[in-house]
Amino acid sequence: MQRYFVNIDQIVDAKVIIGKEDAHHILHVMRMKQGDQIICCTENGQVAVGKIQEITDDFVSVTIVEWMDENRELPVLVTIAQGLPKGDKLEYIVQKGTELGANEFLPFFASRSIVKWDEKKGRKKVERLAKIAKEAAEQSYRNKIPKINLPVKFSEIIKESNNFTHKIVAFEEDAKRGEMRNLSMTLRELKQGDSLLVVIGPEGGLTDQEVSALRENGFISCSFGPRILRTETAPLYILAAVSYHTELLG
């Protein structure tokens, strides 16, 4: 069944009113009709089967048939702190990172970020990223949509890190030196309900000064294998590694 995200306050007396954009998708893309069933997910991760009662271009009325005991989220809450990359790479990171289970994306201005961020256009870009995350979460049967934050200064990453159980930074110099233990060690320490903050640099990587500041604040610097990954590949590598370690190894 097709999956749609709704706010919890949209559900009143076991009925849901789905707004115009998703209504258009239900009617014109999925070609659904009265009596068809969909999956409704709330922002707190609840999942329900809903039956379409009324369908128009502007809204779809749905009755909740059954609440489901379903959880497709990673056991660990992973936040990707991404140094702002060039072009549309951030869109790619958000889309694929959502599919792989990221809980949150926190872009930041790194020393080697060359992107110019206009506040007005930037907010529209974040709105677009949020839409990309929503569509990716629906496609991949997520229970939740990852949070997309406005870009922050590097110093804010250090402040935010105090709220996490584990924190690592991808550092290509570690890979060049052949460091292979730190990521594996961190993955072995992960427990259900833990939170993991992963800092990844932009094109050109993080500076030695940035990595030193992170280390001084409890971050473990890691290589992501012996090969040097692009900035848009590294987030997907770590998310896949967390999924394998926490979900598939048993």
Image (cartoon, rainbow, N blue to C red):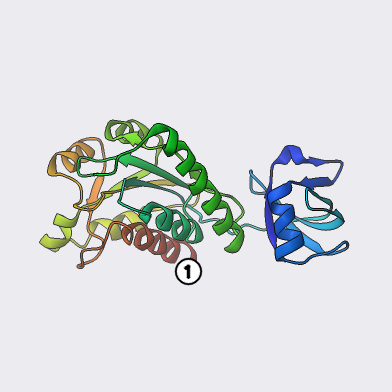
Return the x and y of residue 50 as percentages of the image width and height.
80, 56
Return the x and y of residue 168 as percentages of the image width and height.
29, 48
What residue appears at the point 85 percent right and 46 percent down from the top-left corner?
14
- The quadrant the N terminus occupies is bottom right
129 left or right of 138 in image: left
Return the x and y of residue 83 as percentages of the image width and height.
30, 46
Residues packed near mark 1 inside 10 Å, few (<14), some (14 to 19) or many (20 plus): few
With respect to residue 118, does 112 lie above or below? below
Is residue 69 in view?
A: no
What residue appears at the point 25 percent right and 47 percent down from the top-left corner?
220
137 left or right of 65 in image: left
Return the x and y of residue 137 as percentages of the image width and height.
57, 56
Q: Nearer the viewer, residue 75 or 4?
A: 4
Secondary structure category for the residue under label 1: helix
Q: Amino acid at mark 1?
A: Leu
What residue appears at the point 24 percent right and 56 percent down from the top-left corner?
182
59 left or right of 213 in image: right
| Rendered image quadrant of residue 174 | bottom left
43 left or right of 165 in image: right
User: Which residue matches tag 1?
Assistant: 248
Residue lying farthest to the left in this orientation: 177
What residue appears at the point 29 percent right and 60 percent down from the top-left corner?
184
Q: Nearer the viewer, residue 130 or 163?
A: 130
